[in-house]
Image (cartoon, grey):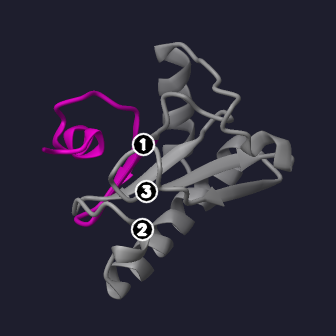
């Protein structure tokens, strides 16, 4: 059965897309720890991050870096935190969390934004890609 991320990639579930290429897809987390919290996933459905083939893993990091640099410019954050936990969805993914402090990376704090706010955040990040 396809993961929720595969369904998002296929367009079966709507999302606030940030970017994609032939191998990766980036979109806003719908339960963000901070404004602009983005998930980067491989289009290839792989459950565990460290099962990603080395060449693809390097490409995923470079794709994530591009997104993180755009987040930093768009959202004027101190840093973009990177988290790979792997428990939420059985599809490897990287969390890119714009942060002013370590406390912004608290997954227990699930923020909520309107659809208009989410779209505005996504568009702002996209302008720096």
Q: Give the quadrant of residue 12.
A: top left
What number of labels is visible? 3
Give the residue pinned by disc 2.
49
Q: Earlier in the sequence, mark 1 or mark 2?
A: 1
Q: Nearer the viewer, mark 3 or mark 2?
A: 2
Closer to the camera, 106 or 56?
A: 106
> Separation of disc 3 and disc 2 at Cα?
7 Å
**Mark drawn on residue 101:** none
| Span colored in magenta | 1-27
Q: Quadrant of the N terminus?
A: top left
Q: Secondary structure at mark 3?
A: loop
Q: Secondary structure at mark 2?
A: helix
**Mark drawn on residue 27:** 1
Q: How far across and how far down the image is residue 114, in percent? A: 53, 13
Q: How far across and how far down the image is residue 49, in percent? A: 42, 68
Give the residue pinned by disc 3.
93
């Amino acid at each position: 059965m396809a993961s929720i991320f595969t369904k998002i990639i296929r367009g079966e579930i709507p999302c606030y897309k940030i970017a994609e290429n032939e191998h990766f897809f980036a979109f806003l987390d719908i339960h963000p720890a901070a404004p602009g919290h983005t998930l980067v996933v491989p289009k290839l459905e792989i459950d565990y991050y460290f099962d990603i083939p080395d060449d693809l893993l390097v490409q995923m990091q470079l794709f994530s870096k591009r997104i993180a640099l755009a987040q930093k410019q768009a959202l004027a954050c101190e840093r973009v935190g990177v988290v790979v936990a792997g428990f939420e969805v059985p599809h490897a993914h990287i969390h890119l969390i714009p942060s002013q402090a370590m406390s912004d990376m608290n997954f227990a704090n699930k923020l909520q934004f309107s659809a208009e706010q989410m779209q505005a955040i996504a568009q702002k990040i996209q302008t720096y890609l």
